[in-house]
């Protein structure tokens, strides 16, 4: 049976969701474990990142980490298990200071995705948020990230309204049309879907099923 040339993964996640950070790390590991360069050199996994905003009421400038956790959950105690789980994937959450409003960060990911750098943008923004203590609600932080990613015209794009309605519409469509109520959420080749930060082995099995179609 011929292996498809492209394995398409559509991924919905929020940069303000720490479990989405874990989920991306595990997806990346699963793709690496497929060892396509050695086994199926004509096949590649292409991930398209779609915006999802869990809390659209987050202050536009972002909120301080502990203050946000106290407001929503009373404390940040729930993050203990998250940190333990993420540590298994090399994620330290070493300098997590902000709970960002991710509207503009999602705009940047859309811009990056249009030139094949969506995954790189996602990773950089996750890293800045959870490991470097940066506030990705801040347009200057996003412009610096765009420069790091080599995205030309990003400052002009971010300082305009371009992409804003696209993010809002895609977020609403994910919730109302696709009925996605938690992230991360993934669809592989339009046939297999799964949610949550599944372990890399589980994700790898799903990708292998898609390869056998």
Image (tube, helix red, strand yellow):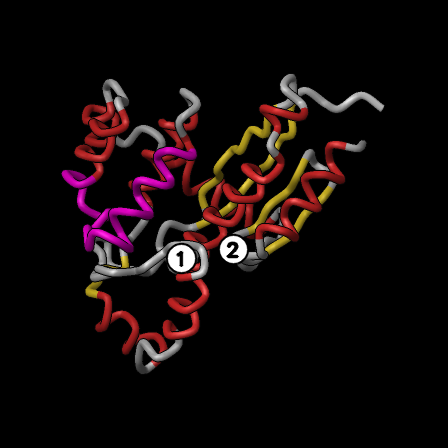
Q: Which residue corresponds to the image point at 17% horizontal and 41% vertical from the top-left? A: 141
Between disc 1 and disc 2, whose residue precedes?
A: 1
Label 1 to label 2, Cα distance in Å? 8 Å
Number of numbered discs on residues:
2
Considering every residue shown, the one lying at the far left of the view is 140
Query: Which residue corresponds to mark 1?
Result: 17
**Horizontally, is 137 left or right of 21 in the view?**
left
Q: Give x and y (percent) for residue 48.
A: 52, 33
Foreground pick, 136 / 168? 136
**Residue 122 location, x and y as percent?**
38, 40
**The N terminus, quarter of image:** top right
Q: Residues within 10 Å of mark 2 (few under 14, many from 20)?
A: many
The boundaries of the magenta stretch are: 119-141
Q: For residue 75, what is the image quadrant?
A: bottom left
Image position, residue 147 (x, y; %): 20, 27
Are the residues at dot 1 and dot 2 in contact (C-beta closer than 8 Å)? yes
Q: What residue is shown with label 2?
A: 183
Q: Is residue 123 magenta?
A: yes
């Amino acid at each position: 049976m011929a292996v498809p040339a492209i394995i398409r993964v559509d991924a919905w996640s929020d940069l303000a969701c720490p479990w989405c950070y874990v989920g991306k790390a595990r997806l990346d590991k699963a793709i690496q474990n497929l060892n396509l360069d050695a086994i199926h050199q004509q096949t590649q996994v292409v991930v398209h990142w779609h915006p999802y905003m869990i809390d659209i009421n987050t202050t536009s400038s972002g909120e301080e980490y502990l203050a946000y956790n106290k407001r929503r959950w009373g404390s940040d105690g729930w993050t203990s298990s998250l940190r333990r789980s993420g540590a298994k994937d090399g994620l330290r959450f070493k300098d997590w200071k902000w709970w960002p409003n991710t509207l503009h960060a999602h705009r940047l990911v859309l811009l990056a995705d249009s030139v094949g750098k969506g995954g790189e943008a996602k990773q950089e923004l996750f890293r800045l948020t959870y490991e470097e203590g940066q506030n990705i609600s801040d347009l200057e932080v996003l412009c610096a990230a765009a420069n790091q990613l080599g995205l030309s015209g990003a400052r002009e794009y971010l300082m305009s309204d371009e992409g804003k309605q696209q993010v809002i519409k895609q977020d609403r469509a994910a919730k109302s049309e696709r009925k996605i109520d938690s992230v991360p959420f993934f669809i592989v080749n339009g046939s297999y879907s799964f949610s949550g930060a599944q372990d890399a082995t589980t994700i790898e099995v799903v990708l292998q099923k898609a390869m056998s179609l």
